């Protein structure tokens, strides 16, 4: 006996993983899009006239995010200037192929595209990093570098907000990871729909915060969206993978467990006497940091000195307070392509200094173009 849609007389083609409701294709599209619209409106994520950088990796999440943002922007007249922003980590056989998908999305959605690369920003690619450190802890390097690369790319296009494709599964996984690591600082902010490192930083928004990964896949499938589905070749041993497997097991037993974990993270209270990291700026590159040197500078110093494990795990106090080398005393960065001499000033000024000219990237460039166990700073599909 055929099943019928819960909202109309048409035959149902799917059962929603989130709540078990039976929907036809058109009703599923409507509910999927409206829920994301309500998330944007209730979270007050954007304001008319803003330039929004959409983190685009070519994967299902970012592809659906780009499609949905363009659709809703036109349907509800958000008044946003949307730009695709991609990071080329330098992973042969993975990122080069996925970027081809992003370039096709650029044409399909008629959106400008900006690409920044690890090689241009740091003088290292992930391929060269893995050759030096091996397959263990590589996600730590990639996650730290990618976060900064997104901010630097967003500064280049003068974006007001960064929009990422983190879905409900990703956020639930992050809550579990931070609990297992005892990372109170990250646990406190990981469920926020909008985050900003400091007053000078670019806010990051997550419109897909309450959207299940399975429903994103179904939406992309039924809409025939063009996306890249291969997993990163360096991620099989990532710490996040164990949290993901745990979440999937929970979902089989109780589908609502993903949202339940997110809601638990949202209402979790931290004792007032708990000592939290004090945010400041890196003395070398000006990026946000809770120490004198940011994690990226420490990791780069280790790579350049042939000591790749220097910044892995708990950072020695001498590195946190005195810097990795005496070069920090002069404020001159010897780690990456920036060669920035910025020691003070706002983060935006420092980042603009880093990426304009000194890193071989100009603002006029064509738009077409820590803990035990080790912290896995990787983000699924941005």
Image (cartoon, grey):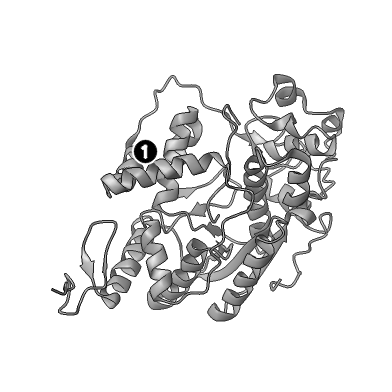
Q: Is residue 59 left or right of residue 332?
A: left
Which quadrant of the figure has residue 179? top left
Image coordinates for residue 182, horizontal then vertical, percent: 48, 27
Foreground pick, 199 / 371: 371
Residue 147 visible in the current orientation: yes
Image coordinates for residue 7, horizontal then vertical, percent: 17, 72
Residue 79 visible in the current orientation: no
Image point (29%, 71%), residue name: 28
- Element class at badge 1: helix
Image point (57%, 46%), residue name: 236
Q: Residues within 10 Å of mark 1 (few under 14, many from 20)?
A: many
Image coordinates for residue 178, horizontal then vertical, percent: 47, 34
Image point (46%, 50%), residue name: 194
Image coordinates for residue 325, horizontal then vertical, percent: 83, 28
Foreground pick, 202 / 137: 137
Image quadrant containing the N terminus: bottom left
Number of numbered callouts drawn? 1
Foreground pick, 180 / 42: 180
Circle 1 sits on which residue? Answer: 265
Image quadrant containing the C terminus: bottom right
Q: Compared with residue 317, is residue 244 higher up or lower down, i.e. above or below? A: below
Image point (73%, 37%), residue name: 299
Which quadrant of the figure has residue 212? bottom left
Q: Compared with residue 263, is residue 233 higher up or lower down, i.e. above or below? A: below
Q: Is residue 278 left or right of residue 13?
A: right
Foreground pick, 240 / 2: 2
């Amino acid at each position: 006996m055929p099943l019928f849609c819960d909202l109309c007389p048409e035959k149902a083609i799917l059962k929603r993983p989130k709540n078990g409701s039976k929907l036809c294709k058109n009703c599923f599209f409507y509910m999927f899009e409206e829920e994301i619209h309500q998330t944007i409106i209730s979270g007050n994520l954007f304001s008319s006239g803003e330039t929004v950088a959409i983190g685009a990796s070519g994967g299902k999440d970012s592809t659906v995010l780009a499609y949905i943002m363009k659709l809703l922007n036109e349907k509800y007249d958000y008044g946003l200037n949307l730009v695709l922003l991609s990071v080329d980590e330098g992973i042969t056989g993975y990122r080069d192929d996925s970027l081809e998908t992003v370039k096709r999305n650029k044409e399909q959605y008629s959106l400008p595209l900006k690409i920044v690369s690890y090689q241009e920003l740091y003088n290292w690619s992930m391929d060269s990093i893995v050759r030096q450190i091996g397959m263990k802890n590589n996600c730590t390097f990639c996650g730290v570098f990618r976060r900064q690369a997104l901010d630097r790319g967003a500064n280049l296009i003068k974006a007001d907000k960064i929009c990422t494709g983190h879905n409900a599964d990703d956020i639930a996984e992050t809550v579990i990871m931070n609990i297992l690591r005892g990372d109170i600082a990250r646990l406190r902010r990981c469920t926020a729909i909008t985050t900003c490192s400091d007053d000078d930083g670019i806010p990051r928004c997550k419109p897909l915060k309450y959207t299940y990964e399975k429903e994103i896949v179904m939406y992309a499938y039924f809409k025939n969206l063009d996306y890249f589905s291969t997993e990163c070749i360096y991620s099989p041993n990532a710490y996040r993978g164990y949290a993901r497997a745990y979440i999937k097991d929970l979902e089989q037993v109780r589908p609502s467990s993903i949202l339940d974990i997110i809601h638990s993270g949202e209402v979790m209270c931290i004792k007032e006497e708990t000592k939290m990291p004090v945010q400041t700026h890196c003395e070398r590159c000006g990026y946000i940091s809770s120490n004198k040197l940011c994690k990226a500078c420490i990791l780069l110093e280790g790579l350049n000195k042939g000591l790749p494990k220097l910044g892995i795990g708990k950072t020695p106090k001498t590195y946190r307070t005195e810097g990795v080398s005496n070069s920090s005393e002069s404020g001159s960065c010897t780690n990456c392509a920036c060669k920035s001499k910025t020691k003070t000033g706002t983060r935006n000024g420092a980042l603009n200094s880093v990426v304009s000219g000194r890193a071989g990237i100009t603002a006029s460039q064509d738009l077409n173009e820590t803990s035990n166990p080790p912290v896995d700073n990787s983000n699924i599909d941005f």
